[in-house]
Amino acid sequence: MTQTQNIAPVAELKEQAKRLRKRLQDTGVMLSHSEALELLAHQHGARDWNTLHALAGNRMQLRIGDRVEGRYLGQPFTAEIRGLTILGDGSHRRVTLQFDAPVDVVQFDSFSAYRQRVTGEIGWDGRSTRHTSNGEPQLTIRPV
């Protein structure tokens, strides 16, 4: 099976299939759009188009500059993505966020510690692999 970090979003996959179909048509090979989608799926190592579509569609698509919201150490935020790196086998990403307003990451009344830029590791579901002492993910994000 293909490596999921190399799969483009569904809209881009459909455009790739259109380009493939057009290119083959220019050389005299006639394909339906569904046949082009199936060929594309095989090129990506998937069994069929439905499998490739599921692999591409189940991943949260994020890009540098995207607006997101979520929770960091239990505190709500809105932010802009400033950095994004795929890690290891592609199952996780390192994301750097610039919060719109500083977030107090300390829950004690006696002092505060504000953060405005943070970096964390998230899975394709937008949840960090690390958790706070109460079991909640340290970081959760979702597109705005």
Image (cartoon, rainbow, N blue to C red):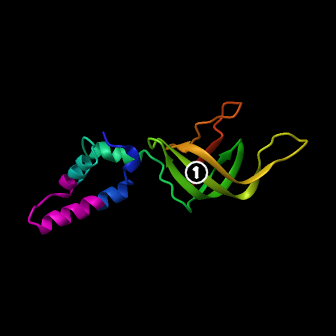
The answer to whether residue 23 is magenta is yes
Asked whether, in this view, residue 11 is left or right of residue 106, the answer is left
Asked whether, in this view, residue 80 is left or right of residue 102, the answer is left
Outermost residue, left side: 28
Q: Relative to residue 58, is residue 19 depicted above or below?
A: below
Asked whether, in this view, residue 42 is left or right of residue 86, the answer is left
Question: Which three-letter amino acid code belongs to the residue tagged 1?
Answer: Val
Asked whether, in this view, residue 99 is left or right of residue 143, the answer is right
What residue is pinned by disc 1?
A: 95
Identified at 38% across, 44% down, the residue is 4
Q: Relative to residue 22, is residue 133 depicted above or below?
A: above
Outermost residue, front side: 88
The answer to whether residue 15 is magenta is no
Tell me residue 98's x, y (percent).
Answer: 66, 58
Identified at 77% across, 45% down, the residue is 105
Q: Which residues are magenta?
A: 16-36
